Image (cartoon, grey):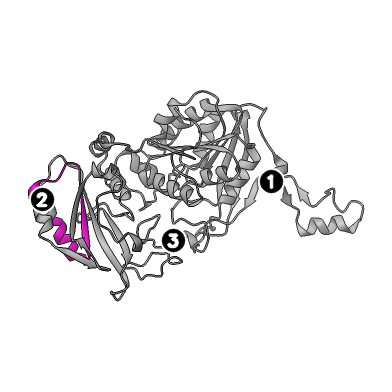
Amino acid sequence: MKLENVIYCGDNKIWLKKFPDKFVDLIYLDPPFFSNKHYEIIFNDGEEIRSFEDRWKGGINHYIEWMRERVFEMHRILKDTGSFYLHCDWHASHYLKVMCDGIFGYNKFRNEIVWWYETGGIPQKDFSRKHDIIFRYSKTDNVTFNPDEIKENRSTEVLRRIASGIPGATRSTGLYRHPSDVWKIPSINAMAKERLHYPTQKPEALLERIIKASSNKGDLILDPFCGCGTTIAVAQKLNRKWIGIDITYLAIDVIKKRLEKSGFKEGKDFKIEGAPADEYSARKLAKSNKFQFQYWAVLKIPGGIPNEKKTGDKGIDGFIYFIDKRKSDKTGKAIISVKGGEKVNPAMVRELVETIASNKADFGILITLLEPTKNMETEATKQGYFEYMGRKIPKVQIISIKDLFTRPIPLTLPTESIVYSYRGNRINRKIVDLPFEEKVKPDPRDE
């Protein structure tokens, strides 16, 4: 089992139990906040959706017990010199503090760090909430801590007093001060260059401060709720080894693309564990979790963007967008439909044809768990072609999950014109200025 520069896909409790004792130098976790918010970027049902939709049927007691099982394992695998940073907010911070005291020990609590930012809404009957809490714990007093790596600039007033030379004006000396437990770091706003449109994304500056303070080059960093991979990206930049765990294929795909964008290659510089690697494991995923299977299948298609709407999606599991200058909005569109059942029939093709027409799409792709029947292929062939840049793209194309593991995937696509995106309904307009069928709703946290 490889234990560095690996992204593990699945329940972190299961993966954590497989790790050896005392081998991680630093743990940072940004778990669900018990916020009762719905993050549309992630979908699923049962236990997993609560990890990302952040709604807990059993209330706060259920949430804390869910967290306790995982933090207990994190304590076990943390080195005696290691640090544990738990990121939370007002929803459950007081409950989480008591829980962590019980696992690490009250006397091993080291700091309550206040991350102060400017974004957020303005409630009519409350003070504006402008901070998160980060609890810092250690297992022993022999803990790695590098304050000189994160020294803070002294205030203009203190520097003025130092410069005055007046005895007793201040006891401070030098341009910098020992780091405090209040960190003013901008959150990810709508104009931030590092923004990935991932709803719980934290700024790289925040993770850089934590990693520099509590680890050294070559140390191993763990983020068991790694989301869009900010901890991984910063650890890589600071020459640390890392492990990330997340339960959704969306997060895994975002991290993979983020690393590849920085020049790192899967298989050479990092590894992904837990994602389907063959037809057998894909079938297991389809049987255990149909939504995650659909998401995974869509992301295997070049340019595939999963449909975030999972109820009433009318058979649309994903899209492909591409440039088509012949159209008034300059945007072409394909529909992706995924069928993970043990039965296939021509009605699935006819259903996709209707969906293509009703959504004014140019063509469609049907992905099936089983091999398509001859009647299905005949029905697809009857639909003809979509003419694009001197090529004929079949209006309906059918592939099975077996085909998803072939290179190249046997599809005819407008490859050179596809608009890629980390997230559905988010097109990078800096790369291609295309109108879009739905306007992106503003994030209230950016107000």
Which of the labelled discs sits on residue 299, or is there none?
A: none
* Amino acid tagged 1: Ile
Give the residue furthest to the bottom.
328
Which of the labelled discs sits on residue 376, or is there none?
A: 2
250 relative to 158 in the view: left or right: left
Foreground residue among 314 and 61: 314
User: Dot 3: within a 10 Å radius of its alpha carbon, few (fewer than 14), some, or many (20 or more) residues?
Assistant: few
Q: Where is residue 352 in the image (x, y as percent from the top left)?
A: 16, 57
Foreground residue among 293 and 267: 267
Q: Quadrant of the N terminus?
A: top left
Per the model, the C-alpha gap separating discs 1 and 2 is 63 Å
| Dot 2 and dot 3 residues touching (CB under 8 Å) | no
Magenta stretch encompasses residue 82: no
Which of the labelled discs sits on residue 150, or is there none?
A: 1
Per the model, the C-alpha gap separating discs 1 and 3 is 31 Å
Residue carrying label 3: 443
